[in-house]
Amino acid sequence: MEEKEFCPSEEVKSLNFIEQRVKKDLEEGRNGGRLQTRFPPEPNGYLHIGHAKAIAMDFGVAEKFGGVCNLRMDDTNPQKEDTEYVEAIKNDIQWLGFQWGKLVYASDYFQDLWDFAEWCILQGRAYVDEQTSEDIAAQKGTPTQAGTNSPFRDRPAEESLRLFREMNSGNVEPGKMILRAKIDMASPNMHFRDPIMYRVLNMPHWRTGNKWNAYPMYDFTHGQSDYLEGVTHSICTLEFVPHRDLYDLFVTWIKEWRGETPENGHDIEDNRPRQFEFNKLNLNYTLMSKRNLLILTKEGVVNGWDDPRMPTICGIRRRGYSPESILRFIDSIGYTTFDALNDIKLMEAAARTDLNERATRISAVLDPVKLIITNYPEGKTEELEVQNNPERPEDGTHTITFSRELWIEREDVKTEPDPKFFRIYKGKETRLKGAYIIDCKEVHCNDSGEIEWIECTYDPDSLAGTEGANRKVKGTIHWLSCAHCLPAEVRNYECLWTCENPRDAIKQYEKEHGVRGIDAMRPFLNPNSLNINTGAFIEAYARTLPAFTYLQFQRTGYFNIDPDSTPDHLVFNSTVSLKDRK
């Protein structure tokens, strides 16, 4: 079936270009009018924010057009894979709000792939090569110079078949033999220059045990698994554009192996998966590579895969982002056919908008100084009702206790009068949020000039919500009753990296200094990425809230209750500030 240029009509221009193509294919009845996608991660690490974009596409397009999306673990490399990662991947997808049709594994198709590879050998389309990896690389050629044939390229099919089976015996040393596809060593597409189909690993697989010692390569596994599974649209990122022709060729071969040929009444160009590509999600001041993220965890730079400084989905969740904010951000940057470096502030802005709608408002004082209301009766307390979220009245209210001695933020006080400062200094009236108007009488300092406590009086007729509250003053601050709040640990996070593009910076440092791994990363790590404040106080109401509750600390920013938190030791993670920090 000849591919024609696709010009979308006005009614589908609101769809992204992948969605437009899917809609067109469904309308034309391709693949019998079916839509099936898949998300195929390798279980060799935790998913990061870049994977979230692929998840949103793979699952979202299936959901939008009434199709199904499978979760398929690309488990062809038992050296690096672990069931821990499988479970983490499942949890992350479900947290983002998606559910797969089937959970499948590339290893489910190992026998089919092996049988197909044997057919390729007997068809003269594959051969066992016994050259060293260095020799093979040297014969590969360049994009402008053709490669040269392997001396084993024309060995008899029966001999290659015998050696291929020997590769799986456990008696062949890794690297001594590989199975290569016989395509075209002069092709301008480097991926067509006799790519590797199988290599020897001689190690058990966590699902198939000791059955296999030779394992298929990604390019040989991916398209065939899509075909065997019934995938119609193989949606991936732009680095796979050069692989697309090989993907299509292998799919054509496997259809022939299965007898789906024109001679048997089949359309070789229909009922097959097709690959489409979109741009990756790249963020500045962020490193997204499972290999490098693993190094950071192993070297103790971060406290595990879910450290809130990590770009992993579980780390972002622990930081306090909601799944809706992540999807909102992904939708805002869109899908294109060119890569770009997105500003992390766009993700923060999406979180800020989302959390304003869902976060519970609560008072927390991060740098406390005591304020004493001298004319408020000693021993008296009042329970004041506050809204959990003014944006959502249905979220209800809770109470906060008011008393004579309060904690306020140190930054809300000045020792000298300042007409442009609308909070507290001697002789200035200020409103305590949700409570009374106070008049500052004295700011008491120690011999070093540090503020020790503030002396105030209050207007008993100025309680918020009463008739006296109509008296206006400039400035409103939050507060906590000293006797009715709880100590809190607040973990403040900043970007883990000091450079805008850490991936490129690390690569350049490796090249210039001849070092790799953590030694190439250290020059670009932010030493101030984590600051732990153990001197904060928070409302007692916080003790009743579960881990991962979304909070807005009044006048400060958005925070999240960390899973380390207990009723006796409350721990909070900073998510984003109330406003964009310029």
Image (tube, rainbow, N blue to C red):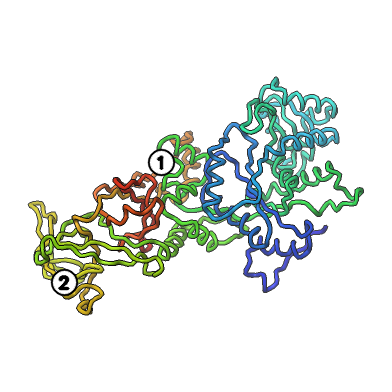
Tell me the tag on residue 229: none
Q: Name the residue under label 1.
A: 302
Q: Nearer the viewer, residue 152 or 323?
A: 323
> Tag 2: residue type?
Glu
Q: Residue lying farthest left?
A: 447
Q: Which of 405 and 158 is in front in this view?
A: 405
The residue lying at 24 percent from left, 49 percent from top is 535
> Tag 1: residue type?
Val
Circles 1 and 2: CB atoms closer than 8 Å: no
Q: Is 336 positioned to the left or the right of 447 in the image? A: right
Position of the C terminus by quadrant = bottom left
Q: Is there any visible trace of residue 335 in the rendered image?
A: yes
Q: For numbered disc 2, what is the local secondary structure?
A: strand
Q: Residue lying farthest right?
A: 263
Q: Is 432 positioned to the left or the right of 387 in the image? A: left
The residue lying at 65 percent from left, 58 percent from top is 62
In percent of width and height, residue 144 lies at 71, 44
Q: Nearer the viewer, residue 428 or 205?
A: 205
N-terminal of the two: label 1 or label 2? Answer: 1
Tell me the tag on residue 429: 2
Closer to the eye: label 1 or 2: 2
Q: How many angstroms separate mark 1 from mark 2 (CA)?
A: 46 Å
Q: Is 361 positioned to the left or the right of 183 in the image? A: left
In percent of width and height, residue 550 lies at 40, 57
Position of the N terminus by quadrant = bottom right
In percent of width and height, residue 28 lies at 78, 64
In percent of width and height, residue 221 lies at 70, 40
Q: For numbered disc 1, what is the local secondary structure?
A: loop
Q: Which of 297 and 503 is in front in this view?
A: 297
The residue lying at 37 percent from left, 61 percent from top is 360
